[in-house]
């Protein structure tokens, strides 16, 4: 019967930790799916972009690092939670005193003393969390996990926004390069005509040199645009995180869908931004840490116990009279620590004050970013409308120029220069249109990755 009780005690101790940890697994590791707002990117009606976004979410190394950091913080929390549970461990030892000098015990002399000692106990230790200090520590780590999740969410918003920014920049560059190539081709034709005029004595040398100089400038700009195109392409490839991808597919410029931007967006929308959420969690965590520091001044109580075997002869290790068991409570109170605990309490109080200031700064920065994004969106829309008006006027002027050229009222040289003017006018329109798209992406980022049109309604 006695041995049966011993086995029951050992079995119960072994089951305590696994059962407790099973309860803690309710907080499962979050999937990064919750940070993916693919429906918002579908508003651009670009299947290539949405496909790239899914590939980005899957392969981007920065996103993977952010996810790993979040998972690491959960493991740290589990370590803290383990302090709330009983600890069971084996710390036995095997000792042999070899033949040596005589040993004296009072008047008794043992010649050539040697002795073996086998000590095989299971030890259980548990700090009774009377004041809830260990519970608060675990709660503080949970807040830290939630803060890390907000960092992960912010990374997803930032990386996806930057990718879309580069994607539409690349589409705009494709259009600008095509237009610049047209300008170069027209300018080459103008130079040829000017050379014919010069050879015929119909224009001065300065006029010819001026047109050749314009040609070199246009070629330089074409080279700069191609360089920027290559740089943007390389950035997109790195963001995708797939070393085997060598090119970026994209739709033509004419297929771009520009999202509508509301006239006003309430600043209340910033409440769901990850930096605001993180700042709020930081305040909560700092407040909990202050409570932990206060309770560290209180006494602690640790319950301990052992079950095992203690023998001086291995063959009698499990004999009836070698069973070892004990249990007890060990209270402890730090009487003097050199001011360490007071300093820790003061530090945590200051940390709380810092958290409040960080929260206030996060609000101001978020409002500024939202207002800047709104102003950028409005300005880009206004500029696009004006550039479109100017482009339409240039179209009318070119139509007149073409008509005059057909009836012989204008030279081919003048007609070519008018064609260049409308291409340059279209360049301004393209830039402003791409700026409109980028402004809507920046606004999406400023509101914390939300669909601002739906929320605003």
Image: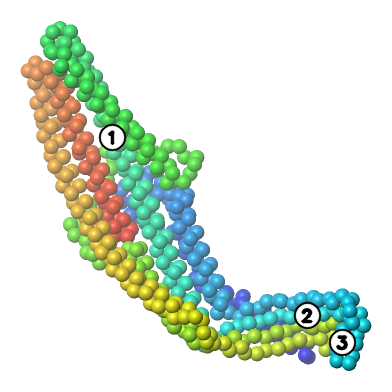
Residue 156 placement, left or right of 371: right
- Tag shown at residue 119: 2
Q: Please tell me whether mark 3 or mark 1 is closer to you in this view.
A: 3
* Quadrant in which the C terminus appears: bottom left
Q: Earlier in the sequence, mark 3 or mark 1?
A: 3
Secondary element type, mark 2: strand
Q: Earlier in the sequence, mark 2 or mark 1?
A: 2
Question: What whole-number distance in Å separates the C-alpha atoms at marks 3 and 2?
Answer: 24 Å
Residue 341 picture location, percent across and down: 47, 80
* Quadrant in which the N terminus appears: bottom right
- Tag shown at residue 175: 1
Q: Quadrant of residue 323?
A: bottom right
Q: Can residue 136 be seen here? A: no
Number of residue marks: 3
Q: Are marks 2 and 1 in contact (CB under 8 Å)?
A: no
Q: Residues within 10 Å of mark 2 (few under 14, many from 20)?
A: some
Residue named by callout 3: 104
Q: Quadrant of residue 312?
A: bottom right
- Tag shown at residue 215: none
Question: What whole-number distance in Å separates the C-alpha atoms at marks 3 and 1?
Answer: 101 Å
Q: Residues within 10 Å of mark 1 (few under 14, many from 20)?
A: some
Q: Residue at x 57, y 83 (%)?
A: 127
Q: Residue at x 12, y 23 (%)?
A: 402
Q: Residue at x 21, y 42 (%)?
A: 432
Q: Quadrant of residue 201?
A: top left
Q: Residues within 10 Å of mark 3 (few under 14, many from 20)?
A: few
Q: Nearer the viewer, residue 348 or 29?
A: 348
Q: Earlier in the sequence, mark 3 or mark 2?
A: 3
């Amino acid at each position: 019967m006695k041995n049966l009780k011993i086995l029951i005690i050992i079995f119960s101790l072994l089951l305590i930790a696994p059962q407790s940890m099973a309860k803690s697994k309710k907080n499962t590791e979050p999937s990064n799916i919750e940070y993916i707002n693919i429906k918002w990117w579908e508003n651009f009606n670009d299947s290539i972009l949405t496909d790239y976004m899914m590939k980005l979410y899957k392969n981007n190394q920065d996103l993977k690092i952010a996810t790993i950091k979040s998972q690491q913080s959960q493991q740290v929390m589990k370590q803290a939670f383990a302090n709330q549970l009983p600890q069971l461990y084996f710390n036995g030892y095997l000792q042999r005193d070899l033949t040596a000098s005589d040993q004296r015990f009072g008047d008794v002399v043992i010649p050539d003393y040697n002795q073996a000692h086998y000590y095989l106990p299971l030890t259980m230790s548990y700090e009774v969390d009377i004041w809830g200090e260990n519970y608060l520590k675990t709660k503080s780590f949970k807040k830290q996990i939630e803060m890390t999740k907000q960092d992960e969410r912010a990374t997803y918003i930032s990386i996806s926004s930057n990718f879309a920014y580069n994607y539409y920049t690349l589409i705009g560059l494709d259009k600008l390069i095509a237009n610049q190539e047209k300008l170069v081709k027209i300018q080459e034709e103008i130079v040829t005509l000017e050379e014919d005029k010069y050879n015929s004595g119909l224009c001065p040398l300065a006029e010819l040199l001026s047109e050749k100089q314009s040609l070199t400038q246009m070629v330089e700009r074409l080279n700069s645009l191609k360089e920027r195109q290559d740089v943007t392409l390389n950035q997109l490839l790195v963001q995708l995180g797939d070393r085997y991808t060598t090119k970026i597919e994209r739709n033509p410029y004419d297929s771009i869908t520009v999202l509508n931007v509301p006239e006003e967006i309430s600043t209340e929308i910033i409440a769901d931004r990850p930096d605001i959420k993180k700042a709020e969690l930081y305040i909560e965590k700092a407040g909990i840490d202050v409570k932990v520091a206060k309770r560290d001044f209180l006494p602690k109580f640790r319950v301990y116990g052992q079950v095992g075997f203690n023998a001086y002869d291995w063959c009698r290790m499990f004999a009836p009279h070698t069973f070892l068991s004990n249990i007890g409570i060990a209270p402890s109170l730090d009487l003097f620590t050199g001011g360490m605990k007071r300093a820790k309490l003061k530090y945590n109080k200051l940390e709380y004050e810092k958290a409040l200031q960080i929260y206030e700064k996060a609000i101001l920065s978020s409002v500024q970013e939202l207002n800047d994004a709104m102003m950028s969106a409005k300005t880009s829309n206004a500029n696009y409308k004006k550039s479109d008006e100017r482009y339409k006027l240039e179209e009318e002027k070119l139509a007149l120029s073409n008509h005059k050229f057909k009836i012989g009222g204008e030279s081919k040289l003048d007609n070519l220069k008018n064609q260049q003017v409308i291409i340059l006018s279209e360049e301004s329109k393209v830039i402003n249109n791409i700026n409109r798209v980028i402004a809507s992406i920046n606004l999406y980022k400023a509101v914390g990755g939300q669909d601002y049109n739906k929320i605003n309604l």
